Amino acid sequence: MRLHVGLVHYPVYNKTGLTIASAVTVTDLHDIARAAKTYGAKQFHVITPLDDQRVIVTRVKEHWTKGYGAQYNRDRKDAMELITVAKSLDDAIMDIKIREDESPTLMATDARSQDRNPVSFEDARRLLREDKVVFLLFGTAWGLVKELIRRADYLLEPILGRSTYNHLSVRSAAAIILDRLAGSPFED
């Protein structure tokens, strides 16, 4: 399985619909890295154009991979080693292309309904079993901008709960989606 996970901090929407760059949340780094490691992702790309936010990500990663955290919690070290910081989506795509010797298939996620047909979890899972390089993109704040979703090769179907309330944290959504795409049973 050649799955890469991306957490996009720009371009995303704020709650009024403006395009923004959102702040990095340290809890997202820990929880998504742990989920990515659990489900066999090759990398976890944190994408932000903001220098100070990239510094935060780098410091957190280094604490858990080289600093005191590396000795304190080996399991966390293994997960945090998946983190790669990129200034832009294009930079992350280029990094994957270099590592995999293949351009990734972009798969966007969104909690809202869109004007295009989403791919089902079952069909997305099939892509992973076919050994395609898949870059699974999660948006922060109020989600990925429409232009980025249109750029993706696939839009994954949204997670639907039992009520009309639909506002999961990105780390919760990432864990659910990773389980649906790469959880047991997964035939290699």
Image (cartoon, grey):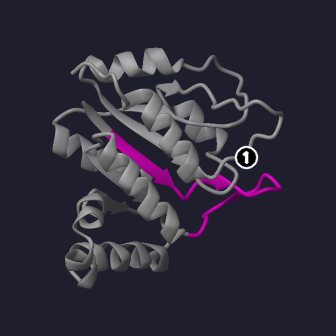
The residue sitting at 69% across, 29% down in the picture is: 160
x and y percent of residue 169 in the render? 63, 52
- In the rendered image, which residue does mark 1 sit on? 167
- Left or right: residue 161 versus residue 107 is right
The residue sitting at 40% across, 49% down in the picture is: 35
x and y percent of residue 61 in the render? 32, 72
| Foreground pick, 47 / 130 | 130
Quadrant in the rendering for residue 134: top left
x and y percent of residue 125 in the render? 39, 21
| Foreground pick, 51 / 184 | 184
Instruction: Inspect the image, locate mark 1, and give the three-letter code of the amino acid beneath it.
Output: His
Instruction: Using the image, determine if residue 51 lies above or below residue 132.
Output: below
Q: Does residue 185 belong to the magenta stretch?
A: no
**Residue 47 visible in the current orientation:** no
Badge 1: residue crowd in 10 Å (few <14, some 14–19, many ≥20): few
State the extent of the magenta-drawn residues as a range: 4-23
- Left or right: residue 50 versus residue 97 is right
| Foreground pick, 155 / 182 | 182
Please state, as top left, top right, bottom left or bottom right, where the N terminus lies in the image. Answer: top left
Q: Does residue 16 belong to the magenta stretch?
A: yes
Helix, strand or loop at label 1? It is loop
The residue sitting at 33% across, 22% down in the picture is: 185
Quadrant in the rendering for residue 31: bottom left
Residue situated furthest bottom in the rendering: 68
x and y percent of residue 90 in the render? 39, 49
Q: How many numbered markers are drawn?
A: 1
- Left or right: residue 8 versus residue 182 is right
**Residue 78 visible in the current orientation:** yes
The residue sitting at 30% across, 65% down in the picture is: 76
Please state, as top left, top right, bottom left or bottom right, where the C terminus lies in the image. Answer: top left
Instruction: Using the image, determine if residue 102 lies above or below residue 143.
Output: above
